[in-house]
Image (cartoon, coloured by chain):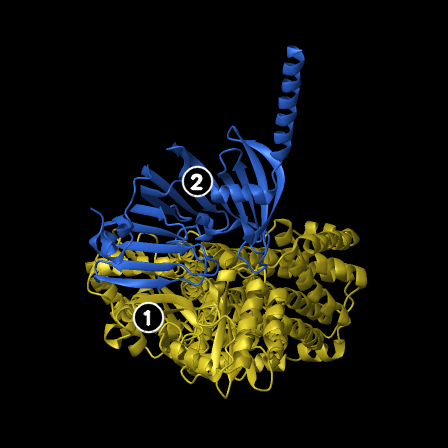
Chain colours: A blue, B yellow
Amino acid sequence: MKTIKISALILLSLLMINTTGMAQKLTGLQIMEKVYNRPTGNDMTANLTMTLINSSGQERVREIKQYIRDFGSVEKKIMFFLKPADVKNTSFMNWSYDKAGKDDDQWIYLPALMKIKRISSDSKGDYFMGSDFTYDDLGDRKPSDDTHKVIGEEKLNGLDCYIVESVPKDEDYMYSKTVTWVVKGRWYGLKKEFYDEDGELLKILTLKKADKIKGFWIIADVEMKNVQTNHKTIMQLSNIKIDTGIPASMFTQRMMKRGVR
Amino acid sequence: MQKLFAKSIKYSWAIIIGVLLVSVFFFFKMKENTRMETNLDKYMPQNHPAFVYSNKAEKWFDIKDGIIIAIENKNGIYNPKTLQIIKDLSKKLMKMHEIDKNDVTSLYTADDIVGTEGGMDVRRFYKRVPKSEKKLEDLKNSVRHNAMVYGMLVDSTETVAVVVARIGDNVFSQDFYKRILDLSHKYEDKENKIYVAGRPIVEGTLALLGPADMKLMVPIVLVVIFLVLFLTLRSIKSTIATLLVVFFSTLWTFGLMATVNIPIYAVSTMIPVMLIAIGVAYGIHLYHHLSLYIVENQNADKDAAIIDMLMQMWRPVSMAAVTTAVGFISLLTSQVYPIKYFGLFTAFGVTMAMFLSLFFIPAFIHVTGLPKVKRKINAEANSGKDELAYKFTDGVLKHSTFTIIATAAIVALSIYGMTKVWINSSFLDKFEKNSQIVKTDAFINDHFGGTSTINVILDGKEKDTFKKPEVLKLVNKMQYDVVKNVPIVGNAFSLVDFLDQINMVMHADSAKYFKIPDKQNLIAQYLLLYEMSGDPENLTKVVDYNYQKLNVTFQLKSDDSKATKSALAAIEKYKKDFEKLGIKINYAGSGYKALVFTDLILEGQIMSLVMSVFIVFILLLLMFRNLKVSIIGTIPILITAVISFGIMGWLDIPLNSTTALLSSIAVGIGIDYAIHFIERYRINSKLGDKLSASKLTMSESGKAILFNAIVVIAGFLVLLFSVFPPNRELGFLVSVNMFTSFLGTLTIMFLLLYKSNVYYEKNKGAKK
């Protein structure tokens, strides 16, 4: 009897596995939701090295100390320039709101002028600090803005990936579509292709390194290459610290002026 | 030689068929392989330092020529309709696949740098077309407030706005040109007038107009040459044979070019001009001699006549052809490939014309029979005296002092005229002054900074040179100075204009701060600020990544070389100041390259002219083995060249790539005439005394030379009726060259030959 019971249990569990297996056939939207909502901790401190390389091979390297904290309805970020020397202590603060349609608040502090100035930008399609990343590319774009479709699965760099094609609902958006290779289980993109308004390949985003810190997958090294202009941006994070409890007072104009210690 | 000619006459049919077969072969080669080279960059020597640098700079800063489309609304542009046109036109241009999206600039696409309470914003002037009075007023004010747009994209009367579409070197085609014009003019209505201008449009129109006009004129030229040739040779058969020589040699030349895969350049169109002028001469000399022979030997046998013609004429014809060809080959010294090819292939064509004259014409005569010479008239003329030629000879000898003085005076005047010759690489100057394209250009130049540009590239020694206040202030000063002091310069634009505007905006729009900041850190921080809020692409057009190279664009209201040079001279004044800061000045852009290119062509042309005179002298020495004769033989070339340049100076015809090449005619024709005349004179000197030999030579060679000149001049004078100024200049200058060659040979050269006693010194000695 017992053996029957056990075998029934095994059978049941097998069935269960099978059904969970079935459930894992995720839709494109579900996959992208998982990517968008992947937990990365409440706050992060890191050094960001941003390298811009133009088609002639000339480089601009900027070193930045950045603090990010999620306050629920708003994500606040403050960045202090360390290098090059002539922009040292320039700081930049960004408050990004969850609420749809609410524009980011952005300030910049220019030490040479000793003044904080508010800057605004027309859209999320703007490029971030002269890099090849738009604010959207950096993770601000909501999955509900696009229609997603799983177009295949593939092993990339030894990792199993879903290939998801995302077409914007807004026809006038700067990309006609994007294709993302999402790592199963980890839910970050390993590679992403961006197609321009005419449907031609515009940029390729490649993830070079992701670190598991305090149980979170943190993207530490990415490269964005514009294949049409041959311009390239590399963003590398180092000294990454997660959930150290950055105080709310860090994200103020007072701190912008005081600079990084 | 006689044996060779006799044999060749036997194979007349074979020769004719052979010539036809070669022609058919080259015809098909031409048909399958001929292509026009329209990319002007391909004309320039790619390893010349000026071009190497300019091409590099064009890549660094994405320098391109712009098509300028202006929209004029007499009631002002700030109304929904006109703003809609600017928007629609901009968007349509961005969609054309020849135009990069980022290369379209207009009030619709431009960024405005504005101050906000407590900050700065970089934003578009408008996206949706403003409709309300207030919004239109706001737009007007923000434009007035932005020095980078006011006067650049909207003029100061606020009745004209421009849309600029920059295009790469190699996208221009006839079809693209047509589509641009169609698209632009579609937006024209009662209130809004559209003008299209800019260097690509001027080049494009030129590329269409020149050949189109030639297509119309060339048949007329050929008909006139045919008719005049017929009047001089008085035989349809002879006329046809002479023109066939020109036709076949031209066909073979272009056929060979197609076979060895060399494209047709703009200057290649001068090859037929040369071959007509030179090739016709051989036929005329042969037939002229033939007719004289027939008159003297009324019952001569056909082949005997041909043999006599060849035996008498093969030497001068082949000597003339070889010298001419070598003269053209001297163009190989030019640094400009199209000119090298021009020289090489014209030399080939001339050589072919010689072979055809010596073998095809005899074969043609053998097959079709001797031309019917109006024996009576000629008989009279010859048996008595060739009145005209004899009188002319007497006249020249009688007025020898006058002839020499007149020649000296004309040469002196010409040399003075030569000092006034100026080089012009302008494209616009090639159009009629009252043509649509010139008027459009003038209209846009009246309202804006200018339709032409020069790019001044400042090259610093170290990184971040162009973040230094003292450097940028000097750039600012140079821009201000050049725009203020050189009338032709309408505007200047560079990194300093961004910084002026940002500095002002960051200081509550206070005009006091419309200047370069005093601290490098602030400049660096402004630039970072601009990158963070604006379109950083804009900066890549004015400064490189390391802030080590700067691109300053000057807008010019004219593309002629004088104007460009006056701007360059004003800029060069800053050379020392920049050098003190470790910065070198260089130039870039198509206007600058055209300027350098024209100088190069000219330099090469003058070099090769000097060289060919020298080579011709050596060849004459080898042929005639007489120093005096060799010196005298170069005289027609020198006189023709000097007078040709002199007339250009006096009549204010600028030198450009086409007119400069015309001096080659001086070599080709001048040496032809000289050799024919001297050779005949040499032969005649054995028959009698100096005067009778001279008279005889004048009636033989002199007449043939006159015929040749008349035929070619008549043909090319037709071009004076062309609607295209460069073709008119061509017609005029070819005629002038022919005329002076002719006159110079028969007057001063003859006189010197006579006075120098060559070929009579020995005789005299013998008689004594």
Query: Which percent across, then down, holds residue B736?
Result: 52, 76
* B422 sits to left or right of B243: left
Let me know if residue B245 appears in the view. Answer: yes
Q: Residue furthest front?
A: A1
Q: Residue at x 28, y 67 (%)?
A: B572
Rendered image: mark on residue A164 = none
Disc 1 secondary structure class:
strand
Q: Residue furthest bottom?
A: B75
Query: Which percent across, then down, holds residue A142?
Result: 51, 51
Whether labels 2 and 1 share one chain: no
Q: Amino acid at mark 1?
A: Gly
* A197 sits to left or right of A112: right
Disc 2 secondary structure class:
loop
Q: Is residue B286 depicted above or below B345 in this figure? A: below
Q: Is residue A227 depicted above or below B603 in this figure? A: above
Q: Amino acid at mark 2?
A: Pro
Residue behind mark 2: A39
Residue behind mark 1: B115
Quadrant of the rendered image containing residue B229: bottom right
The tally of labels here is 2
Question: B190 or B348: nearer the eye?
Answer: B190
Query: Which percent across, then down, holds residue A146?
Result: 57, 51
Chain of the residue on which disc 2 is drawn: A
Let me know if residue B742 appears in the view. Answer: no
Distance, label 2 to label 1, CA atoms, is: 39 Å
Chain of the residue on which disc 1 is drawn: B
Question: B48 or B523: nearer the eye?
Answer: B523
Disc 1 crowd rating (10 Å Cα; few below 14, some 14-19, many 20+) is: many
Question: Given this view, does label 2 or label 1 mark the residue nearer the observer?
Answer: 2
